Amino acid sequence: MDTTRPIIDTTTHLFRHADRHEWDQLAGVFAEEVDLDYTSLAGGAPARLTPDEIIAAWRPGFEAIDAHQHLVANHLVDQRGDAATVTATFIATHQWAGETWTLGGDYTFELAHTDAWRITAMTMTAIWQTGDPTLLARATT
């Protein structure tokens, strides 16, 4: 039995639910608090947020744009009992008003197993991008 499959599935469901605006299901992939680090793209500092706070931050931009898709692959899993670290590559494409912003890089996820595998931390490392990175912000104004 492949014990890493449910771990990878949790990270896959995160992006699938976000891309389909399945906000209730998205909340279920997260632990009660999640350390989010998007500093490689946005600067600032990492934040500790609840699932509801994450969704409140993501939802306006994702619902304002015409389309978005997150492709995540090349998962490497380091499982240690009820804890796991996953690294994966990603490409995220966002379209609005005839414009496209595409971002690529790596994610590192920390997960813990309670009743199921839940994401406790996410670090996004942006490596490249094309288009205007202000697209999401402009779509919500």
Image (cartoon, helix red, strand yellow):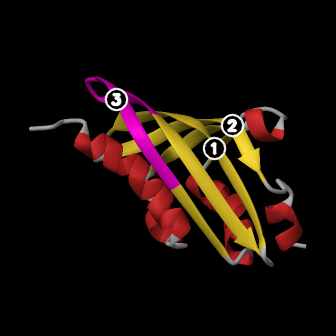
Of callouts 3 and 2, the N-terminal one: 3
Q: Residue 17: horizontal and vertical position, in percent?
A: 47, 65
Mark 1 surroundings within 10 Å by alpha-carbon count, few (fewer than 14), some (14 through 19), many (20 or more): many
Magenta part of the protein: which range? 71-87
Which residue position is annotated with label 3?
Answer: 77
User: Residue 47, percent across and down?
Assistant: 71, 38
Q: CA distance from mark 2 to mark 1?
A: 6 Å
Image spot of residue 93 (x, y percent): 64, 60
Report the side of 60 relative to 54 (left or right): right
- Residue in the image at 73% along x and 46% along y: 129
Q: Amino acid at mark 1?
A: Gly
Q: Secondary structure at mark 3?
A: strand
For residue 104, which numbered disc appears in the image?
Answer: 1
Q: Which of the 4 quarters of the picture holds residue 98?
A: bottom right
80 drawn magenta: yes
At 57% from the left and 54% from the top, the residue drawn is: 51
Q: What amino acid is found at the position of numbered circle 3 in the picture? A: Val
Q: CA distance from mark 3 to mark 2?
A: 20 Å
